[in-house]
Amino acid sequence: MDTVRETARELRAEAAAANERRLLVLHGDRALCYDGAETAVDAFGSDRRVASISAHPVVGEYVETERTGTLLGTTYDCIVLDCHDTCRPNTVGRATGAVDGGGLLVVLLPRPSEWLRAGGRFEKSLAAPPWSISDVRTRFKRRFLETLRTHRGIAIVDVDAGRRTKHGRTDPPPCRPPGRGSFETAHVFPEAVYEACLSADQRAAVSDCERLYEPGTAVVLEADRGRGKSSAAGLAAAALAADGSTVVVTAPSYRNAAELFERAAELLETLGVLSEDGRDGRETPFLRAFDAEIRFESPAEAVESSADVLFVDEAAALPVRRLEELLSVAPATCLSTTVRGYEGAGRGFDVRFRDALEAARDVTERVLSEPIRYAAADPIEVWLFNALLLDATPPPGQLLEGTSSTEATYERLDRDDLADNEALLREVFGLLVSAHYRTQPDDLARLLDAPNVALRALTVDGYPVSVAMLAAEGGLDEGTRRLAYEGDRIRGNLIPDLLTSQLRDPEAGIPTGLRVVRIATHRDARSGGFGSRLLADVEAEYSSPDSGDDRFGDVDYLGVSYGVTPQLLSFWTANGYRTVHLSGTRNEASGERSAVMLRPVSEAGRELADRHVEWFRRRLPDVLSGALRSLDPDVVRGALASIDGGTPPELSDFEWRIVASAADGPGRYDTAPGPFRLLAFRALVDGAVSDPDHERLLVRKVLQETPWAAAADALGYDSERECKRALGDVYGPLVDRYGSELAREETDRFRDG
């Protein structure tokens, strides 16, 4: 291990001198790699903070490969990443992001030739039945190895041969201390707060946080890892607490907010106001500044709390719905978030939450670009951004000016060609990242290697304008379908799994479907019909006898599952997709409920869609008054509008008298809500109510069975009486449209009177 020891010492000396990071790759026999990791850590310095990410403890603090989310907001001098059992892109990003300036990332790999042949747990997750792990390709791994070979600051040692194949030295210039920059703006926080800042960016961010004295404000601090956003938030929180404000801090876990509390404690001590440090061993860590405090609460606890100011650290790692709920905690809020997706958190904050935040608050944004934890020229950051395409962007918008969807060319993107065309790969992945909140580094490997994935695009002059990532599902054998029906999950078969296990359809896995996993259109071409054109071209390709993809065979239906909003539901309905399911629980990433919609392209697909639309129609009235009682009425309206068919409601004479008299006479809804519910449901499916506010009233009061007072308040009526009168007005035309002869006679009696 002399070569490993010497290499680690050289890398450490260079990293420390330049305040940069270095990467050491050890490849070969697992046991030798583990010995090499211990040797490297020992050579790096026994007093360093070390962690290993592996399926087995290696050296230092042990972090399981499935729990790397705990690394958010933390820093280490050395991290060992064991890739013998699995290598997830999300994990690579999180591990690298947690290494501090002057630190070392040690990556353990099998022999490259063996690694390319073998499949780990991540590759297994890409093999959706009926495919197996042997069908998973190695484009991402080959690309990953190539970046390790070609990027600066990365040393490679073959532990089997005891030979170094790449030294990794860059001979950098000596470290320059971070520039604090000039800062002459008048400020409210004490001067000591700004003296504690380590860069001009940080000073500007802290200055922005002075706005948090004003109710109705929000400050958003955005940065890549290592820019000091959490530290800036900690300094601002301490300044506010020192001035008497009660501050609540929340994050996915306290560990994620530890840096914020560390800087806050240092500043409170400097200001001489730290009266109690309650961080060690406390269920609710806090810092007290005499009568004020900074306390940590989990997101679930924080939404039930109140404060003068709320700080949300690692905001992008929280569901969008939770972020929206947190806005009610305090009159002013500071949110710090990572700009790029190597946290593996997706972009729900930017894509889904931004509009809600700007509608509710006066927002000040600050992007911190100057690194603090390591130098600006850090070669490992350059490597990471390239390896995981964290800096991928769509093509420039000016290239698309004046184009229309009719001019675009429909293209089947061959993934071998895409892997060899770096510029196109960056543009395609950049589109997916910029337009979809759930896109993350794992999706790069899925896009390149999953056997059930296909890519289609609309291009203009060779530049991608709209991209669809498609996944084949279904076509399952009897044994797999039986296991799913008995409760086992069908990996990579989201829609057949749902229809089989939850909705109890034992034959749902027989037809072959094509699920639209992602569809993304360039922001400068949205509302131009590109997404709809792309979906139409996909359908035309796969519904023809000569399908464009031999891997999938005949396709019976197109499907989609997504975090439902009224706007998205309208888009999919306009493109002929019909709702078959609305989830009773919320999506972890978006905080929204998921919708599943189908569009058949064969007779088998039509039979599947028809029976599940009918089943959805029959069960929806029950779940709307139960699990979906809080669902947005506009989502309910859209879902019902997408399920045509069914028969008019059959009411007894007694029921028609109740409904008719409530519409035009002395009858009351509360006497027998059942027939009102049947009629409301049918009317919404048929689009028989022309006023959207009246549709919302039918959903909120009748279908979701909201109490009168709550319904009146939610829908903006001045009183319960006004709400009741409006409901009667809605039912008059419905009796005219659907009512029996007796019902019309009943209404005529009151109208004539």
Image (cartoon, rainbow, N blue to C red):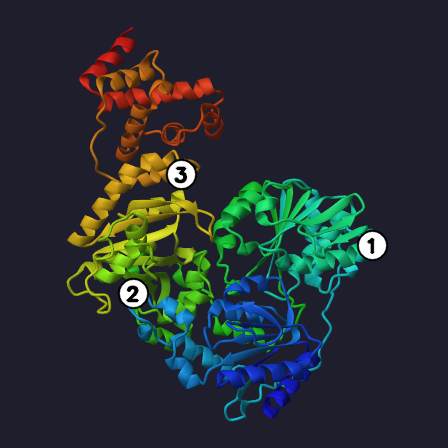
Mark on residue 129? 2
In the rendered image, which quarter is residue 521 located in?
bottom left
Residue found 33% across the figure and 54% down from its top: 487
Q: Mark 1: which secondary structure?
A: helix
| Viewer can see residue 193 | no
* Depth check, front residue: 448 or 378: 448
Three-letter amino acid code at disc 3? Answer: Leu
Separation (CA) of disc 2 from disc 3: 32 Å
In the rendered image, which quarter is residue 395 located in?
bottom left
Q: Position of residue 348 (x, y in %)?
A: 49, 54
Mark sitting earlier along the chain (2/1):
2
Depth-wise, is mark 3 or mark 1 nearer the camera?
3
Q: Position of residue 499 (x, y in %)?
A: 29, 51
Residue occupied by mark 1: 271
Q: Position of residue 465 (x, y in %)?
A: 37, 61
* Depth check, front residue: 8 or 316: 8
Image vertical order of residue 62 relative to residue 253, above or below: below
Separation (CA) of disc 2 from disc 1: 61 Å
Tell me the quarter of the image containing the C terminus: top left
Mark sitting earlier along the chain (3/1):
1
Residue occupied by mark 3: 628
